[in-house]
């Protein structure tokens, strides 16, 4: 998935096209290329934000559909020193280029480009790129919730600007690059990250916004067998897949991080965060608390504020439309 190789292949698709046609509209990306080499210059945090805001025209946090077509066309034609008409780029060439780009950079295969994926496509200053943690994601949402608690110092349920600044400094220290960034740069990074990820523009990051900045390796509940059970208004046709004992064993082990035989505290919050990721795009800590209260009310049979194996099994089975496909499953014990 070499960035240079992929972009070279994309440019070769357009190599036989005429470049003399004039177009009144300016190619936004051309300003970021070197005049002599025609290679992209290293983008600063501010320039990266300008590019993002230019192409994410609806502000939904993704470059998709016609936005993606516009970005891709300008990406490959910006190598020319003059503007070219959109009619020069054939639909077939655009589709071939899009396939190459998405295969290389669309890491979650959702057919869109998110902020962190764009940072892999365009050359961006290294210290700013480190903030996206693409090479070092958290192990699970349990760890995410621990980080959330650590940096939400005032327990407001949000990561505010000063807390975000401390979090970004922590990431740079982990990479041993904190000495490479001045206080002024750190403030710029904080302002840029806040503008990029604060979708509702309230000047702080809620849970769902922070989750976009701080990725985890995998939301296990996003696997198809669980998606069919949890997604609202699912359009999946046919009968639901059967949950097996092995499926539920894996879920329990994933969230019972301390092997206490219970999912509790931040383990439970991590499970709920993953669950909410399936059904909501925007959620905050108040939503998580409400979800926690509902889950414990319905599933915590002994009212100890924890979820044991059988209680988790009951929760997952309640969403499954068919019986568990495993003989003797009903007798499984949490210990």
Image (cartoon, helix red, strand yellow):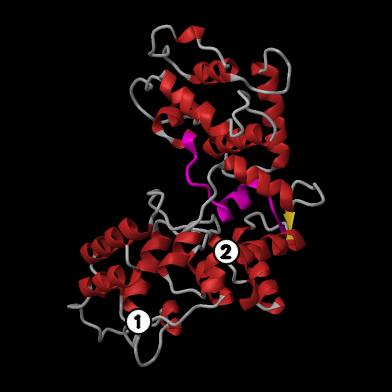
Question: Which residue is label 1 attached to?
Answer: 23
Q: How many neighbours does mark 1 have within 10 angstroms: few (below 14), some (14-19), or many (20 or more)?
A: few
Question: Which residue is label 2 attached to?
Answer: 131
Residue 303 in which image quadrant: top right
- Is 188 on the left or on the right of 244, as rendered? right
First of labels 1, 2 by sequence position: 1
Question: Gap between marks 1 and 2, in whole Å?
Answer: 37 Å
Residue 114 in magenta stretch: no
Determine the residue located farthest toward the bottom in the rendered image. Answer: 36
Measuring 70% from the left and 72% from the top, which residue is drawn there? Answer: 187
Please state which of residues 239 and 272 is positioned toward the viewer in this rendering.
Answer: 272
- Is 29 on the left or on the right of 205, as rendered? left
Measuring 34% from the left and 87% from the top, which residue is drawn there? Answer: 82
- Is 216 on the left or on the right of 101, as rendered? right
Measuring 53% from the left and 26% from the top, which residue is drawn there? Answer: 252
Residue 231 position, x and y percent, is 49, 31
Residue 266 position, x and y percent, is 67, 36
Determine the residue located farthest toward the left in the rendered image. Answer: 16
Tell me which segment is drawn in magenta: 203-220
Determine the residue located farthest toward the right in the rendered image. Answer: 154
Residue 114 position, x and y percent, is 48, 57
Please state which of residues 180 and 284 is positioned toward the viewer in this rendering.
Answer: 180
Q: Is 15 located above or below residue 262 in the figure?
A: below
Please state which of residues 150 and 285 is positioned toward the viewer in this rendering.
Answer: 150
Q: Is 37 located above or below residue 62 in the figure?
A: below
Q: How many neighbours does mark 2 have within 10 angstroms: few (below 14), some (14-19), or many (20 or more)?
A: many
């Amino acid at each position: 998935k070499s960035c240079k190789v992929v972009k070279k292949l994309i440019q070769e698709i357009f190599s036989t096209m005429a470049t003399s046609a004039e177009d009144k509209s300016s190619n936004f990306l051309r300003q970021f290329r070197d005049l002599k080499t025609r290679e992209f210059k290293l983008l600063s945090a501010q320039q990266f934000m300008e590019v993002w805001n230019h192409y994410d025209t609806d502000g939904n946090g993704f470059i998709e559909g016609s936005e993606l077509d516009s970005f891709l066309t300008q990406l490959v034609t910006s190598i020319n020193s003059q503007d070219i008409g959109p009619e020069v780029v054939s639909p077939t060439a655009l589709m071939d280029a899009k396939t190459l780009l998405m295969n290389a950079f669309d890491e979650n295969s959702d057919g869109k480009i998110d902020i962190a994926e764009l940072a892999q496509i365009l050359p961006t200053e290294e210290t700013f790129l480190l903030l996206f943690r693409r090479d070092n994601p958290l192990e699970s949402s349990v760890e995410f919730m621990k980080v959330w608690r650590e940096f939400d110092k005032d327990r407001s349920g949000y990561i505010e600007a000063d807390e975000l600044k401390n979090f970004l400094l922590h990431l740079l220290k982990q990479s041993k690059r904190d000495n490479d960034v001045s206080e002024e740069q750190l403030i710029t990074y904080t302002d840029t990250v806040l503008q990029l990820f604060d979708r509702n523009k309230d000047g702080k990051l809620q849970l769902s916004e922070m989750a976009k900045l701080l990725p985890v390796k995998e939301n296990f509940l996003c696997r198809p067998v669980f998606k069919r059970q949890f997604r609202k208004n699912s359009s999946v046709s046919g009968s639901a897949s059967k949950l097996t004992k092995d499926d539920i064993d894996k879920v329990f082990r994933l969230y019972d991080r301390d092997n206490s035989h219970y999912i509790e505290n931040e383990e439970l919050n991590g499970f709920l965060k993953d669950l909410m990721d399936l059904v909501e795009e925007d959620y905050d800590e108040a939503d998580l608390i409400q979800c926690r209260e509902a889950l414990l009310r319905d599933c915590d049979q002994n009212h100890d504020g924890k979820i044991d194996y059988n209680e988790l099994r009951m929760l997952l089975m309640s969403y499954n439309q068919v019986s568990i496909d495993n003989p003797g499953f009903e007798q499984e014990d949490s210990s």
